[in-house]
């Protein structure tokens, strides 16, 4: 049983085991009209750059780039855009290091628990986890946003970001998906996991390491958050 529980924790925290969703959420989407600026308010977003330290996350199919490195770069770009718009941002990590020391499953669990502890302390209004996906089928590609199915508001944020991906990226996944992942359950505040694309797909990997494409991803995440805030 203990082994099974550890396995479940492992499944819920490692991107490369993300199951391709069968229960997609593709409701009709009503677009809000964006104003010129984000409403001025005291609003805190936690940006969680997935993995780090001895946990590289997914590995690029051709370039062998580490997911953790890309997650941090994209997270910092999102941080800057949000801060420029007057939104408070707290990062779970700002360096290549993870939150815990060590390696292996126990380390991974500790790292995740420390992220949760930090989020609980910050008491943010929203949590955005940034990841890159990977799958054994190398033809799979597309950005996709995951949310906890018990949180309608998380689903709403996921749909706003996914809609931006759909409008901006050529190969975005059409739908958001519910997911049972640790980072979606750290706080009662709405939380989503943004999987920017598949590092296991050679073409998408090439795009994901390209700065221009990264900027497109960041703009989508940013605009999704802004549009969500404007309808609130
Ligand atoms: Zn990941």
Image: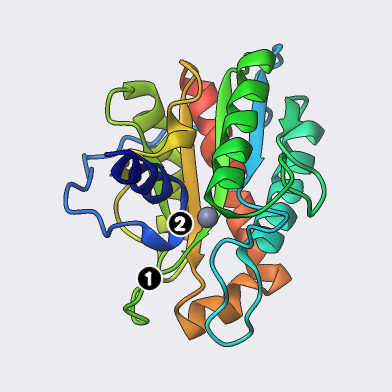
The circle drawn on residue 75 is none
Q: Secondary structure at mark 2?
A: helix
On screen, residue 42 versus residue 7, left or right, reads right
Queried on whether the Cβ of the residue with tag 1 lies below 8 angstroms from ligand 1, the answer reads no
Q: Secondary structure at mark 1?
A: loop
Identify residue for label 2: 15
Along the line of sight, which residue is nearer the eye, 113 or 159? 113
Image location of residue 92, percent across then percent down: 71, 35
**Which residue appears farthest toward the front when viewing the image?**
2
Queried on whether the Cβ of the residue with tag 2 lies below 8 angstroms from ligand 1, the answer reads yes
Image location of residue 195, percent across then percent down: 48, 54
Q: How many marks?
A: 2
Q: Residues within 10 Å of mark 1 (few under 14, many from 20)?
A: some
Location of residue 83 by image quarter: top right
Q: Residues within 10 Å of mark 2 (few under 14, many from 20)?
A: many
Of labels 2 and 1, earlier in sequence is: 2
Q: Quadrant of the N terminus?
A: top left
Q: In the rendered view, would you say 160 is above or below 19?
A: above
Seen at 61% across and 60% down, the residue is 216
CA gap between label 2 and label 1 equals 9 Å
Identify residue for label 1: 135
Label 2–label 1 contact, CB within 8 A: no
Image location of residue 57, percent across then percent down: 57, 61
Along the line of sight, which residue is nearer the eye, 124 or 58? 58
Seen at 72% across and 69% down, the residue is 211
Picture colour scheme:
rainbow
Seen at 79% across and 54% down, the residue is 96
On screen, residue 78 versus residue 152, left or right, reads right
Seen at 40% across and 28% down, the residue is 154
Q: In the rendered view, would you say 153 is above or below 138?
A: above
């Amino acid at each position: 049983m203990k082994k099974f529980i550890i396995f479940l924790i492992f499944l819920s925290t490692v991107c490369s085991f993300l199951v391709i969703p069968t229960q997609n959420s593709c409701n009709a989407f009503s677009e809000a009209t964006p104003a010129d600026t984000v409403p001025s308010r005291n609003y805190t977003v936690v940006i969680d750059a997935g993995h780090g330290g001895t946990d590289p996350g997914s590995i690029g199919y051709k370039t062998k780039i580490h997911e953790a490195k890309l997650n941090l770069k994209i997270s910092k770009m999102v941080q800057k855009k949000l801060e420029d718009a007057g939104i408070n941002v707290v990062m779970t990590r700002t360096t290549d290091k993870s939150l815990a020391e060590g390696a292996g499953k126990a380390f991974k669990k500790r790292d995740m628990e420390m992220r949760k502890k930090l989020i609980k302390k910050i008491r943010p209004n929203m949590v955005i986890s940034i990841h890159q996906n990977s799958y054994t089928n190398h033809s799979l590609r597309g950005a996709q946003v995951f949310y906890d199915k018990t949180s309608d508001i998380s689903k709403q944020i996921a749909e706003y970001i996914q809609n931006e991906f759909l409008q901006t990226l050529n190969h975005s996944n059409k739908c958001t998906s519910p997911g049972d992942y640790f980072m979606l359950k750290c706080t009662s505040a709405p939380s989503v996991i943004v999987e920017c694309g598949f590092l296991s797909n050679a073409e998408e990997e090439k795009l994901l390491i390209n700065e221009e494409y990264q900027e497109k991803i960041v703009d989508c995440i940013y605009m999704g958050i802004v549009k969500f805030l404007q309808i609130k």
